[in-house]
Image (tube, rainbow, N blue to C red):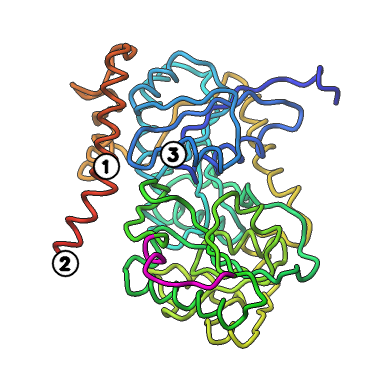
Amino acid sequence: MPASAKKTRRVAVLADSDTRWKWGALTANRIAPEDSDIRLDGYLLRGRATPTARQLQEVGVHADSLNEVTAVEFLRTMAKEQYDVLVLALVGGGVQAMLHGLKRVWEGRSDRPVVVTGYVGVVYEKLADGLLLRHGADLVLANSRQDAERFRAVYEGVGADASSVTEVALPFLGGEPYTGEHDPYTVVFAAQPSVPDNRKDRTYLLNRLIQHARKHPEREVLLKLRSKPGEHTTHIEELPYQKLVQRLEPPANFKLVYGNMGEVLDRTDLMVTISSTAALESLHRRIPTVVLTDLGVREVLGNHHFVGSGCLASWDQLDEGHRPTPDEEWVSRQGVCADGTYGAAFDPARERIAKLLGRPGGLPALTPYYTPATAPGYLPGILARHHLGPDGSPLPGAPAHDREPGPVRQIVRRAARGAYRHGVQRVAPVIRRMGEL
């Protein structure tokens, strides 16, 4: 269809971290109806994990506009702006708060946007909790056939409408398939901010990575890091590998790298991780991929999700040259689409959104499973964290709920946010560690 004949759809994405911004923005592009272009407006929810300019640049996803907002400011904007689709790329509690807030600001409106939410990657913990907090969106995206089945079972099991569950795939898969070894042969360890969560285990992994570099001087061994010290991602990182490595003397073929994971995978011959979503990106490109068993196969590590994948192995095996062979049936159930069907993975979501946008009379009010009647001991606390009352309206004293912030307020807010981040990222971890002595 000629570009001039395409309809422009207005899409908004609200995200609370760099990873969720990447997921939300890429998802917005993937699910846009095929006969349309999109104008993408990004909103970053102010908090401890609000991405920095460097993180946003590294993500490599661009929007037509990008603004940092509080929950109340965002709701005020949604009351005035007309969007076709809204993607909530937030932690579960944030999604639930926004659903109730949006229900209030859109009261009496049938021309509201289609509301979409989902998960950034592998869902290996808090399945019921996270899902029920996301209930109420028009589409709850499942990144694989396995997740779609689990999501529907949870909703149906509590008597909630499961029709919102829509099977797709991870939106950031792509890149050229692996065709053979590079020169030099490159091993990449994809670090995670919160797994493992203690100095002993993180030091162990770092030592084994360095030992592998020494044992194989002909190889390039890369430690792929998500953030620089002082930056936050989706999860808190209290023991950055950058600081741990300062006490060691790695060989010249060992390097720390940042940047877009896709670009790193372009030169990867062996991907190693505990349970990072990078493993799924790697499997999609048919790069040899290992999920480590050195620290056990445990729910707290998330590597239990890979049971049956054929990818579980230890550093001892890798040191001796082991290359895993993934189980094709397992891979096909994980939304990895290594068989070339990735292009069609988002068709069901596009079709559903197009149908909702064309619904006669517009869309009905949002109806989350949790209400003051069904969860009176849980929901008010979730909403209060975002300065919202039980009915989704701003609580008294909510930041700038009644007016746009002026220049002085903006300066004070930036200073306060800097102090808050310093407290969360630098001071609080030190206090916690002192308490463990």
Query: SS of the residue at dot 3?
Result: loop
Residue 241: x percent and y percent?
41, 62
Judging by the rendered image, the residue that carries numbered circle 1 is 422
Q: Is the residue marked by circle 2 packed among few (<14), some (14-19), or many (20+) residues within 10 Å?
A: few
Q: Work out how far the residue at label 1 is from the one at label 2, CA to CA, in angstroms.
A: 21 Å
Quarter of the image for residue 184 reads: bottom right
The one nearer the camera, 279 or 229, is: 229
Residue 333: x percent and y percent?
64, 64
Judging by the rendered image, the residue that carries numbered circle 2 is 436
Mark earlier in primary sequence (1, 2)? 1
Q: Is residue 166 left or right of residue 197?
A: right
Query: SS of the residue at dot 1?
Result: helix
* Of marks 1 and 3, the one in the foreground: 1
Q: What stretch is highlighted in magenta?
A: 243-252
Residue 246 shown in magenta: yes
* Of marks 1 and 2, the one in the foreground: 1
Count the numbered circles shown: 3
Residue 419 shown in magenta: no
Q: Which residue is drawn at 26% across and 44% down?
A: 375
Mark earlier in primary sequence (1, 3)? 3
Disc 3 residue type (three-letter): Pro
Quarter of the image for residue 331 reads: bottom right
Judging by the rendered image, the residue that carries numbered circle 3 is 51
The one nearer the camera, 428 or 110, is: 428
